[in-house]
Image (cartoon, coloured by chain):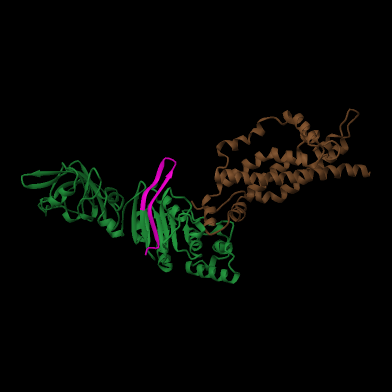
Chain colours: A green, B brown
Amino acid sequence: MAKLVVRSLRKLFGDFEAVKDVSFEVSEKETLCLLGPSGCGKTTTLRMIAGLETPTSGYIYIDDVLVNDVPPQKRGIGLVFQDYAIFPHMSVFDNLAFGLKVRRTPKHELTAKVDETARLLGLSDVLHESAKGLGLSEIQRVAIGRSIILDPKILLLDEPLSNVAAKVRERMRGELKRIQKEIGIATVFVTHDQLEAMVLGDRIAVMKDGLIEQIAGPDEVYAHPHTLFVADFIGSPSMNLIECELLEKEDRVFLDAKDFAINITKFAETIKKKTTGPELIMGIRPEDLSMSIKKIDPKAIRGEVQFIESLGSSSVYHLRVGQKPILVKGLLEVEAGDKVWVTFDLKKLHLFDKKTEVAIW
Amino acid sequence: MTSIAEAITRPFINSLIIASLSTIFAVLIGFLAAYGVSRYRAGGTFTIFFTLLTRMIPGATFVAPLMVYYATLRLLDTYQALILLYTAVTLTYSIWILKGFIDEVPAEWEEAALLEGAHPWRVVTQVTIPLIKGGIAASALFIFILNWTEFLFALVISVTQVVTLPVQISMYASAVGRMYGPQAALGLIATIPMVIIGYVIQKHLITGFTFGRVR
């Protein structure tokens, strides 16, 4: 049975519905990432699990016990705040020991526990220094230490890497992953950074406007986005999204995007069954497109290179196909202004209903 | 000679008792009020502005009614009278100064302590107060100076027993003549506590509010 179960959680702030209907489960040793743009309700959800906000309706179970009315300190959770919330007027030791002192833990037990945690997090050297003078990575580890020292059943992390410079973030992300592996408890992680979610999450719940759009493993979310929003939000550079129309000519079926058309006769039946109308949006990831200077594939589409973003190991080519901007990721020796041929794999194509924004292919 | 020594020590001690006690009360009550306003929006938005009302009216306007009031309560010429009055009048300052400091302490820090099982009182005494002790020192000094130098109310309410220093200093000038020597000496003596207190807490005043907040 799942460690943490959230059922139909809803939260109103006055008239504003921050969280509309959120349900998910987190099992033992699993990390769930709540991913979404700011204001999508992910932090509010986390705060409700922690008990810092009262849900308007819905249920939260920890270890199969309903905890809606259990005060935060009795829920058995550890929370790492966005700006870490370590106390600057105390030493690292006192910061780590705060919760234990509150619980009147015997002195030798307290010291042993703090030492053990400090060792796990590599904080033994700075244990007796003031928290004021610590570096960012140390502050992060102290914050994690404080949240795990009371042996919580669930660890909650609220955007712990969002205030950190890119270079440091990469290192801290790795460190977080290592600590997570080592302590192995059910974790809910809130972030707006898709890369962070991909690296740290066993599963990702993509949120938008207080609702979960899709909940699945990182690869699944990337390869099979359920909605237009997920498709657009996940992946960098983001997916090419092109409006098109389902067009039938004689016994053949096309996706007509004005500047080009794609023959989909083979799959027409399944697609037509799922759509609410002929207006669709097709999506294809920049890395699933390939470019060539000569026309190899007879179905290739002609485009012109507008400019090139070099990423080092590969480049992002900004093309113009007719009137439409299209991104292609790859490696080809061309210059701005060159004409190229673009081909893509029908298997990698995504199709969304324009009205419902739900994936149909 | 004894009478001169007494003329100095008695008002000095009176002033010390009244100014310190009313400062302690004002800061204590002010802190609790400010904490409630800052963290729980106690009293809504209006009450906090209502406290400014005492500063909008010149003190002289309520000297006469206050004297009648105190006379009825038989509080004239007592320590309680001045302590009560000074606490009430300076409460506005302590609420507003401390509210500013408490607002600066991220609520997350208190929530973190709460989550670890600390009682709200413990959160306040071990997290909030240590963090804003610079602010508490500043507001205490400010209020102490106000109380120490207050003249008008002290003159009216203390008649013979509870004479404060500023009142005593004023007594050396009369219709008959003026005793510049003792008056100046007493004036100098009156500044001593200010200098000492200022010296002792200057460290807190400068440190004020430097947190290592992550941003």
**B94 left or right of A123 in image:** right
Q: Is B185 or B8 nearer to us in this picture?
A: B8
**B18 left or right of B9 in image:** left
- SS assignment for the magenta stretch, majority: strand
Residue A245 position, x and y percent, is 16, 43
Q: Is residue B144 visible?
A: yes
Q: Is residue A345 visible?
A: no
- The single residue placed furthest to the right in the displayed view is B1
Q: Is residue A198 above or below residue A259?
A: below
Q: Is residue A225 above or below residue B85?
A: below
Residue B39 position, x and y percent, is 55, 46
Residue at x 86%, y 32% (from the top left corner): B173
Q: Is A33 or B178 nearer to us in this picture?
A: A33
Start-end of magenta stretch? A1-22
Q: Is residue A4 above or below residue B166?
A: below
Q: Is residue B124 above or below residue A103?
A: above
Q: Quadrant of the N terminus of chain A?
A: bottom left
**A302 left or right of A210 in image:** left
Residue A156 position, x and y percent, is 44, 58
Residue at x 36%, y 54% (from the top left corner): A23
Residue at x 71%, y 41% (from the top left corner): B87
Q: Is A325 or B23 nearer to us in this picture?
A: B23
Residue B14 on the magenta span: no
Residue B105 position, x and y percent, is 56, 49
